[in-house]
Each structure stands twice: as structure tokens, then as C-alpha cells.
Amino acid sequence: MAKAGRPKADVTKEKVVSVRMKPADYAKLKEYADSSKMTVTEVVQKGVSIVIDEK
């Protein structure tokens, strides 16, 4: 019998980061994510990559 559930990813995401934001900033983030058809997590991960890659 085959295993049920989601297959394992090549790279596991085991770290969780929590961020406090002003409601207005979160609204902008959510609006951007929705208009870009991305999740808030994807937008934040992309933003972190951009900042790190600028270095």
C-alpha cells in the first residue's frame, strides 16, 4: 500500500519566523500578495532573497 499524504520536499523548511507589523504595512503586504497571486510567505521569502542577493 502506498504512503498517504504529501511527498517530502527536496529542501525542508523547518525554521519558523514570526514578525510583528503595523496593520497598515500588513495590509500593503497582503494586497501585494493577492494582486501577484502569491502567498504572504512567498512574498516575504522573495523579499529576503532580494535583500541578501544585493550584498
Image (cartoon, rainbow, N blue to C red):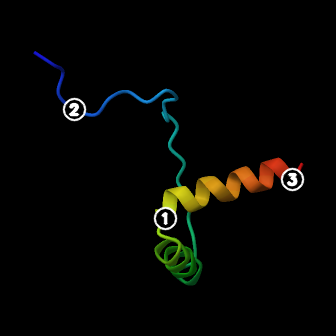
48 vs 41, left or right, is right
Which of the pair 22/49 is nearer the observer?
Answer: 49
For mark 3, what is the residue? 54
Left of 11 or right of it: where is 46?
A: right
Q: Identify the residue under disc 1.
A: 38
Mark 1 or mark 3, earlier in chain: 1
Residue reaching furthest to the bottom: 24
Mark 3 closeness class: few <14, some 14–19, many ≥20 residues within 10 Å: few
Residue 31 image position (x, y, % from top left):
51, 80
First in residue order: circle 2 vs circle 3: 2
Disc 2 or 1, which lies upstream in sequence? 2
Going by the image, does 6 lie left or right of 25? left
Residues tagged 2 and 3 counted as in contact (Cβ below 8 A): no
Please give the name of the residue rendered at 46% of the width and 75% of the height, measured from the top-left corner. 34
52 in relation to 8, above or below: below
Q: Identify the residue at image location x=18%, y=21%.
A: 3
Tag 1 near tag 3, CB within 8 Å = no
Q: Identify the residue at image location x=78%, y=55%.
A: 51
Residue flagged by tag 3: what amino acid is it?
Glu
Instruction: Give the amino acid type for the residue marked by disc 1 in the picture.
Output: Met
Residue type, numbered disc 2: Gly
- Say which element carries label 3: helix
